[in-house]
Image (cartoon, helix red, strand yellow):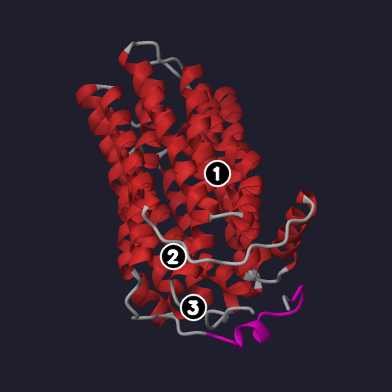
Amino acid sequence: MVPSSGTATPIASATVPNLDTTRLPGSFNRLAWSNLAAQSAEQIGLAAAPLVAVLALGAGAGEAGLLQTAQTLPFLLLAVPAGVLADRASRRRLMVGAEGLRALSLLGILGLAWIDLLTLPWLAVLGFLGAAGTVAYSVAAPSLVPALVPAGALSTANGRLELARSAAFTAGPALAGGLIGWAGAGLAFGFAAALSILAVLLLAGLREPPRSTSARRDLLREVRDGAELALAHPLLRPVLLTAVFFNVAFIVMQAVYVPYAVNSLAMTASGVGATLGMFGVGMVVAALLAPRITGLLPFGSVVAIGPLAGLAAALLMVLTIWVPSAWLAALSFFLIGAGPLLWTISTTTLRQAVTPGEMLGRVSAVVVTATYGSRPVGAAIGAFVGGAFGAELCIVVAALGFLVQALVILTSPVSRLVRQPGLVG
């Protein structure tokens, strides 16, 4: 039975160890390698698109914000249908199809770049299709993990996936900036497409354990069940709200960062890629330290580190308005990578623990819709404020959003959890 109200204390009483040293099975390791290739492809493509838009196609802050909107809109529109599919059918096959779609979108951008027909509208349309693949992959992957690893190893497995994602966030932007500066957009998108195809091949060989799928009922009823659980659960609700405010604020800042860095901080393409790459460096450092941190601190404190680090990162970026410095911008991205990675590991583990297995796809879809789906809102805010008032005001607005998300989680029962909750029946 899933509680809908009350404090966190009864839920926290059924616990599993924070750190598991069991060797993870080969099927999970194949998923982890596929995740590394897929995340690398995504990050190279996401970093290359605004660089090409600004440096080759002459986009300004407003147009960069609109491009960001197109690349994030599928999270709002498609996550819920993907979640229903993940609960009804094979999650592995869904991920293979999703990653194949992303590979096709990257190949399309590559082809247009080679024949010199790439435009901002084409970049936006193909970015939308690639993001549609990302949505389905993002919903299905955390739903598949509990079927591949023991319950006590969830935190370890999620940490392993986040380490792979951290490596992608580190190398992706730097590779994109370097490849574009050296040989143009074609090589960057071609390399990303090759990595995406590799992810498909790795997933194709993964053995998914058989499972009983949920009874097929009315689509709206199934969606409502997932939404009710995510919004009514006393631990999931504040996590969801915090993630919404975090993502809106982060995308407001990210939507204008490239033109802001080029025009106000006088950075080159390689410099922009290097500062964005510090996001991944922070993730790698946090992923490597995560087992020790989760072993030393209460579970709720680990969750709170992410929102607090996000707030500190936003204040550093605001400081660059008066003290223009690539180093401050780099430190900002380092913090916004390190803290939220611990957030992702801990809150994903929390969601997997308190959600019945047959509903994981739908609940994950609600989380993805509310969090990633809020990114188009942030991108639209960035496009409007940046186009009308300049990038500097966007950065201040983003800092206010980061303040709200920190307050939400610090005043919730999640921050008072001592240990990871045990799996529900």
**Viewer-nearest residue: 83 or 131:** 83
The residue mark sitting in front, 2 or 3, is 3
Q: Is residue 114 above or below residue 371?
A: above
Determine which residue is flagged by label 1. 398
**Of all residues shown, which one is farthest toward the top?**
116
Q: Quadrant of residue 143?
A: bottom right
Q: Is residue 277 above or below residue 20?
A: above
Determine which residue is flagged by label 2. 342
Placement of the C terminus among the 4 image quadrants: bottom right
Q: Estimate the x, y position of residue 300 in percent, counting from the top left.
A: 54, 75
Q: Estimate the x, y position of residue 147 in percent, counting from the top left.
A: 50, 69
Q: Quadrant of residue 75?
A: top right
Q: How many marks?
A: 3
Secondary structure of residue under mark 3: helix
User: Could you tell me how far apart the alpha carbons at marks 1 and 2 are, in whole angstroms?
Assistant: 21 Å
Nearer the N terminus, badge 1 or badge 3?
A: 3
At label 1, the amino acid type is Ala
- The residue stretch that appears in magenta: 3-15
At label 3, the amino acid type is Ala
